Amino acid sequence: MAVGDFHMPDYGVLDYDMLREGIIALSRQASAAIMEIYGGDFAVQHKDDDSPLTAADLASHRCIVEGLEKLSPRIPILSEESAEEVPALLRRQWPLMWLVDPLDGTREFVKRNGEFTVNIALIQDGEAVLGVVQAPVTGALWHGQRGRGAFRREAGGDLPIRVRTPATAPLRVAASRSHRDARTEAVLARMGDIEPVGVGSSLKFCRLAEGGMDAYPRFGPTSEWDTAAGQCVLEAAGGAVLDLAPGGNFGRPLRYNQRDTILNGEFMALGDKSLPWREWLA
């Protein structure tokens, strides 16, 4: 589609329940496709930015995109594995879009440590309003919706989840035990009594959402599809993901499809929003 050919579709009244169940089903189908490859031998390629790419990324991408096109044919899709095909000028005209990471944590997939996920989020006017995170290895699935709460889906149904409040020492913080830059070290030192927790991919947001962790400071690069679904789950559970980029958005919730780049700035994810995160950054 050429940029000049774009016309704003009439989305009508969205059936969020239908969309939620649809993307839950798709995340499970994509997880099954990933696990078929995970159990055998697979080659690892590298993209231009040196990030790894496997057949599992592509299989999940095809499954999700084909499914979303049937589920909601009027809503455009931005997936990590096809993002280069969509000009920024075009996608920034989309008030509503799917944002997809078919396999978040490909490095964890290659290491076979199980800490990777499938992420699907619905973005409306820059905000993640519906999100699903699926962990293929364990089968765990989290979903959240703006104003409707966050849940972990179990065999018997949905279990409501909430962040840990008040968060008391030691704070459980998503942080590598061995590889930290100077800024991260300084922030962790200001947090006081902490318990570092190592976990990969968007599982960090889900651990925060269900009260298993308290904070996740991120100063390295991430892409919008890495965070959108997890942010939606965390916010629906009572937490926050705050933009730390200097300027007018500092301290505001992270937003999507607002800039030419799909890279996020620095951010702080919190379970208990009353934590003194500004003091940690001093």
Image: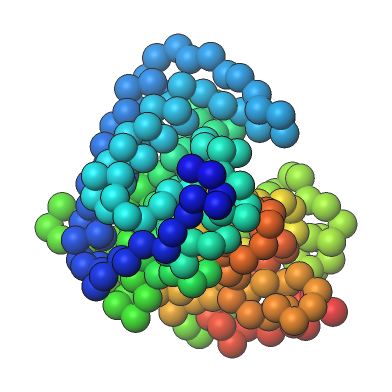
Asked if one can make out residue 180 in the rendered structure from this viewpoint, the answer is yes
Question: Is residue 84 rendered to the left or right of residue 142?
Answer: right
| 72 or 133, nearer to the observer | 72
Question: Is residue 132 rendered to the left or right of residue 153?
Answer: right
Residue at 32% x, 75% y: name it: 149
| 73 or 148, nearer to the observer | 73
User: Where 99 falls versus 162 (above or below)?
Assistant: above
Taking the view exactly as shown, the residue that stands out farthest to the front is 4
Residue at 49% x, 76% y: name it: 239
Residue 265, given in percent of the width and then of the height, sits at 72, 62
User: What is the image's colouring?
Assistant: rainbow
User: Where 221 falls versus 39 (above or below)?
Assistant: below
On the image, which quarter does residue 111 sit in? top right
| 94 or 167, nearer to the observer | 94
On the image, which quarter does residue 277 sit in? bottom right
Residue 279, given in percent of the width and then of the height, sits at 77, 83
Taking the view exactly as shown, the residue that stands out farthest to the left is 156
Residue at 69% x, 54% y: name it: 261
Residue 136, given in percent of the width and then of the height, sits at 35, 39
